[in-house]
Image (tube, rainbow, N blue to C red):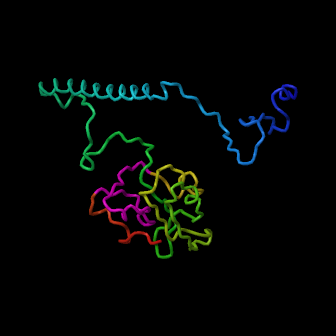
Amino acid sequence: MSEQLGQNADFDNLIDGHVMPQPAYQGEFTEGEIVKYYNPSRMTLLEKLYVPAIIGGLMITARVFFTNMAKWGIWFTYWIRGKGKDAPKGAVTIYYPEETRPDYSPINRGKHILTMRQQKGPSGEALPQCVACYMCATACPAFCIHIVAGESPDPNIEKYCVEFDIEMDKCIFCGYCEEACPVDAIRLTPEPRMADYQRERMIYDREYLMTWNPTYVEDDHVYPGGHPREE
């Protein structure tokens, strides 16, 4: 074993018996020198002209176009015979929000919610599961989660979130907050309907995140509190 490893690398480059890869740059550094630690791929002449990529993209577009036209042609023959409802259609535009897509994935990352504790607060109000550890805000690459911590009324819990705001117009729906949370306090539901006409309504606060119910009517989608989050 040691002889085999010795042929490939020095023991200084071993960690737990695994051979560490050698750096791409084997020379000595000089002051002011710019060194690249990767091996850049060399493009061929055709790749530099981007002709194959352009032709490939046009072929994909043409295939989709003519496939949809063929489906609509078949549907038209059914429609003439009065059986248009039974025939498959080609690609169509969804007129949202009057029409909705029925094929959303069950694991789609959509509207955020805050889970709640079984125990109620001193006044009977619902308490979030969040313990204000800031793990979700720390893991968020978009920096769109803002938490204000407070002392929990439950003696078994040190803190809870007094304020919990998510700027949904900045969220990239990566799911890092859900993975980082140690108490399963935040989840991403499959609900995709989050579009709005006013930017201040895209700031979801703690009360709104604890409702769990998406809104569909414009008049019902009012920002909780009536004002955006203040810095």
User: Which residue is nearer to you in this view: 27 or 93?
Assistant: 27
**Residue sitting farthest toward the right:** 3
Image coordinates of residue 136 in percent, x first then y, are 56, 58
Q: Which residue is drawn at 26% across and 31% down?
A: 90
* Quarter of the image with the N terminus in it: top right
Image coordinates of residue 19 in percent, x first then y, are 78, 33
Q: Does the magenta stretch include residue 203?
A: yes
Q: Main secondary structure of the magenta part?
A: loop
Q: Residue at x 47, y 76 (%)?
A: 123
Find residue 156 and report its image quarter. Answer: bottom right
Say above or below: 163 vs 171: below
User: Which residue is nearer to you in this view: 198 or 126?
Assistant: 198
Region rendered in magenta: 189-216
Image coordinates of residue 167 in percent, x first then y, are 44, 61
**Residue sitting farthest toward the bottom:** 123
Q: Residue at x 30, y 56 (%)?
A: 216
Say above or below: 195 vs 36: below
